Amino acid sequence: MPRERLSVVVTRRLPEAVETRLSELFDVQLRDEDTPMSQEELVTAVQNADVLVPTVTDTIDGGLLGQAGENLRLIANYGAGVDNIDVATARQRGILVSNTPGVLTDDTADMTMALILAVTRRIPEGVSVMQQGEWSGWAPTALLGGRIGGRRLGILGMGRIGQAVARRASVFGMQVHYHNRRRLRPEVEEELEATYWESLDQMVARMDVISVHCPSTPSTFHLMNARRLKLLKPSAVIINTSRGEVIDENALTRLIRTGEIAGAGLDVYEHGTQVNPRLRQLPNVVLLPHMGSATLEGRIEMGEKVIINIKTFEDGHRPPDQVVPAML
């Protein structure tokens, strides 16, 4: 008798190529609508599936895991961040958790540079003038921004994405500085031409651009709080393509409105889709809808990692991208 295929529930629509491959390998339940599952649907999924494939829009907390059926043994997250999953409770219940690290590094780093340029060169303001038919011709003083060559970039979090941003920024002629939980090895620092700051306060006070690239953990919640944001130079801008909770969004809004910070480029927000309406109104703030990793190539590579994690688990081995509490 052939072995029964794993029951896999996918919580969101994925690229067609990924859904097709999942269907070939497993007994998969795909999502028809491109909307998050309701709480009731998530409960049904964890009660019946062998493997759950959630995304960052799904909260897999202790309460939900407490209702999981005996068959649920793997949560193969479609995404690198796992702050939407109670990894410790999952481990206590014998449920493995995997993620999809590494594949979105270049896409997110590209978007970081795009946001730096968009804010400093006032690109959205120029787009708005053209779309509204308000352009009356070139003028020497119109929409003056600033060049990024020679500016100091302070990277908060020097993991894969932070290092990819550093490499790109160096090509643009920026001076790279960074703060990290652990200092990089000397040879990596030398290759990146990056200057380490043990004190985050001292670094942010001297930078022209701050770019946030750290995960969401209890220790990074509001790491850029009102006190630390006030240390920025009035000419400085802040960029965030990591996790919204790292920045106190209300404090950031106040400081930009009063001219104490020159601008911001944000792809993530403290309260998900509930963005501070005052922040939306500021012309020197560029807001994107969490699209830093939104390339077709990246999304397919994420799916391939999910499939490899599930297949490896099915074959009785540890998923290559298994996440354990000690890693967080």
Image: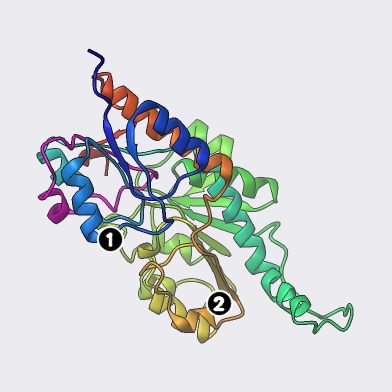
Give the quadrant of residue 123: bottom right
**Camera-nearest residue between 48 and 70:** 48
Q: Is residue 2 left or right of residue 65?
A: right
x, y percent for residue 165 = 56, 47
Q: Residue at image x 63%, y 50%?
A: 169
x, y percent for residue 239 = 52, 63
Write down the residue under mark 2.
Answer: 234
Write down the residue under mark 1.
Answer: 38
Q: Is residue 149 left or right of residue 95?
A: right
Magenta part of the protein: which range? 60-86
Q: Residue at image x 35%, y 57%?
A: 57
Is 83 included in the stretch rendered in magenta?
A: yes
SS of the residue under disc 2? loop
Q: Residue at image x 10%, y 39%?
A: 93
Q: Residues within 10 Å of mark 2 (few under 14, many from 20)?
A: some
Q: Earlier in the sequence, mark 1 or mark 2?
A: 1
